[in-house]
Image (cartoon, grey):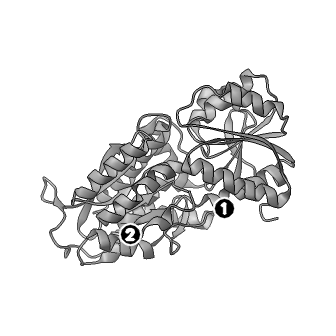
Amino acid sequence: MKKVLSVLLAVMMVATILTGCSGGAKESNETSAKGEKVVKFGLLAPLTGTNAEYGKGFQIATQMAIDEINAAGGVNGYKLAIEVADSKGDQKESSDLARKFGDDKEIKAIIGDFASGACMANAPIVDAAGIVQLSPTASNPDYAGMSPYTFSIMGRQDAEAPFFAKYIIDKYLGAKSVALIYINSDWGVASHDNFVKGAEEVGLNIVAEANYVQDEKDFSSVLLKLKAADPEVLVIFDQGAVPQIVNQVAQLDWDVQITTLGPGTSQQILDLCGKNAEGLITSTPFFFDPESEAQTAWKKTFKEKAGFEPTVHPVVAYDCVYLLAKAIEMIGDGEVSRDAIRDNLQKAEIEGLAGPIKFSEAGDISRQYLICAVENGQFVIKEGYDYSK
């Protein structure tokens, strides 16, 4: 990891991917008021609604990357720009915005959306428009393969969810009985189903389960059902609703080990749950190393701009901009077209802030996962644990 991070420092200084040839691209791209040639991206993110923490993180992190790249001179004679659109965490809204971006010939690639369901709904739209949709976070295993233009860099739930069952529940916690509560979305169902497969492999007993719809607020009835089954561990599959569920578990005076797949090391959980979050266990493909100057500086800058601590989600959004910059740099003095970006993105490799990125043929990547816990009001990595057995 430290070797990767040393490379990252060079990436953040834009020394390796932004020194391509200048000029040469055809004038099919926007020109700024200053007469500069510009390549514009579109960003789809839930800036309002249940997952606003993550959407705001996307917005801040992508702009940080663009500012760094432009300050270093841009890419191949181009400056980068981004148009931000609030998808509100709604699939229809996201699809309407994806269609708008697809119709706007100045938009050369789309970053987003946050949820797998929105990205999957957008797949036929971006395919028809011939424009890349690079999601920082879509992890439904079916998403990336839906079109040559659909990509994701979070990893896949057919890897993380079995890891959660086999390594966090079985090996780390040593539990044998679990109850599951999950959001009834494309991502939630995929996470649940892949967790169940992992649970079956190690003999975990799923004693009860329940699902709920987006924006549900009152979980008391389903939690009472799960509590009656007396599991050792409760697993929550969601992002934005996790604080409400954690707090409502506490209101029921239910003494159960709570774990959650989805939100990463969310500051919102700590802020909204307080002592109720103590002992919470989660997984993440990335955790800030306090010994890394590059990561510490990035985290500090992000928090100053956003007003909250970053999770892995803004980190991978930041990496998406650098991936697209790499694809543009690989075009050389050819035309910066949507198809050229797609073709070179498929081949692009970088050492990102969240680790190395190299796409599979389908357009997604593999990640390794860590175990995090809330201890004394903050997330910590559970080090010294054997993840390999």
Residue 340 at x, y percent in the picture? 31, 74
- Rate crowding at label 1 as few (under 14), some (14 to 19) or many (20 or more) other CA atoms within 10 Å: some
Residue occupied by mark 2: 326
Determine whether, in the image, residue 70 is placed left or right of residue 53. left
Q: Amino acid at mark 1?
A: Ala
The residue singled out by tag 1 in the image is 159
Corner quadrant of residue 28: bottom left
The mark found on residue 20 in the picture is none
Q: Is residue 250 visible?
A: yes
Q: Quadrant of the N terminus?
A: bottom right
At x 39% / y 51%, what residue is drawn? 62
Judge by depth and name the residue closer to the eye, 366 or 14: 366
State whether residue 385 appears in this view.
no
In this image, 175 relative to 13: left or right?
A: right
SS at circle 1: helix
Real-space Cα distance between discs 1 and 2? 27 Å
Image coords of residue 292 (percent x, y): 58, 55
